[in-house]
Amino acid sequence: MSGPTQSTPPTRTRSWWGWGWADAHPDDAECAAMGSLIPGTLARPLPVPRVRDLRIAPPAVEPPASLAHLVDTGPEQRAAHAMGKAYRDIARALRGRPGRIPDLVARPTDEREVADLLDWAGERRVAVVPYGGGSSVSGGVEYRGDAHRAVLSLDLTAMGRVLEVDVPGRAARIQAGTLGPSLEDQLRPHGLTLRHFPQSFEFSTLGGWLATRAGGHYATGRTHIDDFVQSLRVVTPAGTSESWRLPASGAGPSPDRLFLGSEGALGVITEAWVRLQPRPAHKASAALSFARFGAALEAVRALAQSDLAPANCRLLDAGEAALSGASQDGSAVLVLGFESADGPVTDRLARAVELARSHGGRRDGAAHAEEGAPADAAVGAWRSAFLRMPYLRDGLARMGAVAETFETAATWDRIPALVQAVREEVGAAALKASGHPATVNCRLTHVYPDGAAPYFTVLAGGRPGDEVAFWDELKAVAGEVLHRHRATITHHHAVGRDHRPGYDLQRPEPFALALRAAKGALDPRGILNPGVLVD
Amino acid sequence: MSGPTQSTPPTRTRSWWGWGWADAHPDDAECAAMGSLIPGTLARPLPVPRVRDLRIAPPAVEPPASLAHLVDTGPEQRAAHAMGKAYRDIARALRGRPGRIPDLVARPTDEREVADLLDWAGERRVAVVPYGGGSSVSGGVEYRGDAHRAVLSLDLTAMGRVLEVDVPGRAARIQAGTLGPSLEDQLRPHGLTLRHFPQSFEFSTLGGWLATRAGGHYATGRTHIDDFVQSLRVVTPAGTSESWRLPASGAGPSPDRLFLGSEGALGVITEAWVRLQPRPAHKASAALSFARFGAALEAVRALAQSDLAPANCRLLDAGEAALSGASQDGSAVLVLGFESADGPVTDRLARAVELARSHGGRRDGAAHAEEGAPADAAVGAWRSAFLRMPYLRDGLARMGAVAETFETAATWDRIPALVQAVREEVGAAALKASGHPATVNCRLTHVYPDGAAPYFTVLAGGRPGDEVAFWDELKAVAGEVLHRHRATITHHHAVGRDHRPGYDLQRPEPFALALRAAKGALDPRGILNPGVLVD
């Protein structure tokens, strides 16, 4: 299961308000067809929003002459940088109420320019919101509040090069603004890959992955971007931090681990040495179905605790399996995949299938699907749906439906009750608030010997015109359930602004004291991504 | 290669000045025999030092009545807690010049008592030096300076219980003062193991491992204690920090990673939930010899970059192989070991041996050594030497020899020149300073796809009576070489006080600002392990 690795012709246009490419959005007829499946939605889709209807005011500040060539003050770019791509952001754009529009969009081309922009912003009390691919689904790239004179969106994508590749040492120095496909394109001639494929891969950057502790789509092993970091360079208002390029070190608390997950609040990550891997040459995948979700959970735990290390071990509950076309008979579906650059993986797949069978899994499709051969129908269906999902979400949003996901992680002992509670309580809250039944599905995306990461999908209608408040209500219920079950507020979608309440409850208070102090030392004027992580 | 897991009868006495058990030290004749191998050493061993010769003054403060039952003010315990177990510490004890003797040794039995002791110390400006097993080899458990009214050694070993075991979830909640053998003894009935075996295993605690980011002896995979942490509880002067028990989380910078490696300077780790593993049932090991160290390095890199994941992949250079009895013909020796709880590992061993052969490795011993069967002679010799090594070091110290190790890590591109420079420059410095040739050997203990951890042994004579200054000179040369090659000042022995100069050069300055600010927030009175990490 490699992610998409082809670079895209530069002629395609990114949607300013919705996910990805403007030309990939479902048309009105598709939207209406999807909407008809969710009770309480609109009869016709909301129109695609236009920037000119926002009547964006001129910027509150002018960029300095010395940096003006880096800055765009046009309404199109400012609107496109106003928010990330959470359902909440899409719904606000559709209703003509986006978040605060940044005054300026700057695209520095090197680290000196980043530092100059921070210096200028510090002097002028201008908030700086670092921006990679803009795919945040937690309110990470917008400004809320009014404590600053103006807002600068700091778009890093002009810093998009692989600067150095150490082939024998399997590492590369890469600029933070490099988007996923370009990063893989630049590594491919060296026979290496970062092998980090979050769902947002096409529209997110290395710097964004690092700042948000992104998770790739691999179920086990090295899937968190944290584990790929050899060293970081970070421009802070207090100076530039550069850690040494090391395979490991025990010298004090890890400097990199302070900046990983700092979400632009402590500094701007400008480049990193990251660990690479050879491109997998051997792949095999299979799907199994389970009559009971509980039995499937036990199978997944056994797999996670074996030494098989599946690249994919994605468990879809009955609703999720139906939604993605992987199964229509009420079964849960387990999608297994193995990859190796070293040698065949069919033996490992066979052992994994056997283990899953011993927990009640049924093998419906073909025996094994080697690379190049047609994958199991369920595997293929799931993969297509996975990449298409955000576009469909936006199509449903145009129908006045709430369509969103959220993810968490918890230890195995808490998983069954947690999944049930989220389904029941979020479902009940939706019914109560809208008068219509909602869909709440669950899949496990990442599995660990000691726990798993459940990922929930919510589809609900019945409050057209009031979708944002409706979703906020459901999200508050979900956050409360997660907190009660001691499940993290986010497994790989970052805290941003949307998850602050849950994060503040989860974070140990002494650590909050330490983090606030660190913020004060590195960003004494409080210009970096205000409102994120600490106040 | 499991470490020693038997608990030891409580009747044995720990050495106050040297490594481990007092009765395990080499006798005078053995010392003399060893010393005769190193030019420029004494003819007769220095006497075993006695606490009464230190003429320890009464404590500068009295413990409060409410906590007096936790406090020992006797000279034996105070002397035993004055220093760690670096060569430097041993030499100072042998010469009757130990570090500052702590005024009090406190042994809290619960977290409340830890907090009470910190409160009292904060009010009285008493420095608190957290103390686990006391096996620090970097000056981590002593006090230097005179900025505090008195010094309290906070011995955590009365908090030594496994409190909870989650067998299906493979995790346990364990008190920080639990020593290695006791920890494994308490887990054994559950069929689980932490599988963390640093060389100090018998004489170090979970809390010490966490505070110093200890490395186990496994060469690849999960060997750093960092990776075993689900959650931590840490008592700080600003309150108690408790992270949630989670398999993974992307919610901001990891709170645990700030405390991992904090070496008692930010708080006192009191307990942790840690990830466990089933006990390995399948083991196999083998040794290969290489005529050239450079070829062996290439073999090790290939192994580290394969998917074989050897549990042991320890490369001894010719000198180290001779010293440990693994080889006497000038060959480098590679010790390979595989372990699994799941299934046989002989196939993996065979593939690893084949890979090593393709790089010039020669297979001298028996084909494979399954568990229970006699291991290769070289493997067995190395293992015995490994556990006996610190005792021999102390015996050599009694002969007036410098006998010490230090370890580092660097990316593959730097390893050959780094190893050569350390050997040459430290050797030359020893010769110049003492008039006698010194031995400088190297082994690789941990290997990564992107680099390795070289571990150096230095044996030098010629400056009896002046050993501490001699070693400090050699260590300064070593530190300079490491810095020039951008190799970390410590891979798994922590910074303590001895590595501060190298650490200060390695640590990015903005991170130092953040760390100082965090220290100020958590330990505003500056009582926690003063001089460690930050000033």
Image: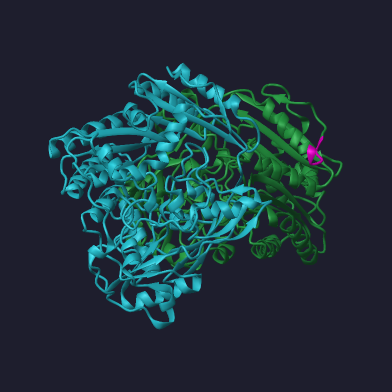
Chain colours: A green, B cyan
Q: Residue B462 in the image: x percent, y percent?
A: 16, 40
Of the pair A15 and B453, the residue shown nearer to us: B453
Of the pair B242 and A48, the residue shown nearer to us: B242
Name the residue: 59% across, 26% down.
B346
Q: Residue B409 in the image: x percent, y percent?
A: 37, 39
Query: With A132 as the anchor, is A319 left or right in this view?
Result: right
Q: Is residue B206 above or below residue B318?
A: below
Of the pair B327 and A110, the residue shown nearer to us: B327
Q: Is residue A390 above or below residue A2?
A: below
Residue B519 highlighted magenta (yes or no): no
Of the pair A477 and B36, the residue shown nearer to us: B36
Query: With B209 as the anchor, is A326 left or right in this view?
Result: right
Magenta region = A358-362
Whether residue A361 is visible, yes or no, is: yes
Q: Residue B238 in the image: x percent, y percent?
A: 43, 71
Quarter of the view holding residue A495: bottom right
Name the residue: 76% across, 33% down.
A354
Whether residue B145 is visible, yes or no, is: no
Name the residue: 36% across, 29% down.
B321
Q: Quadrant of the C terminus of chain B?
A: bottom left
Name the residue: 41% across, 39% down.
B386
Q: Tell which residue pokes out farthest to the right in this image.
A: A329
Q: Tell which residue pokes out farthest to the bottom in this image.
A: B65
Please name the predominant secondary structure of the magenta segment in the image: loop
Q: Residue A466 in the image: x percent, y percent?
A: 71, 63
Q: Is residue A450 above or below residue A166?
A: below
Q: Tell me how many marks there are.
A: 0
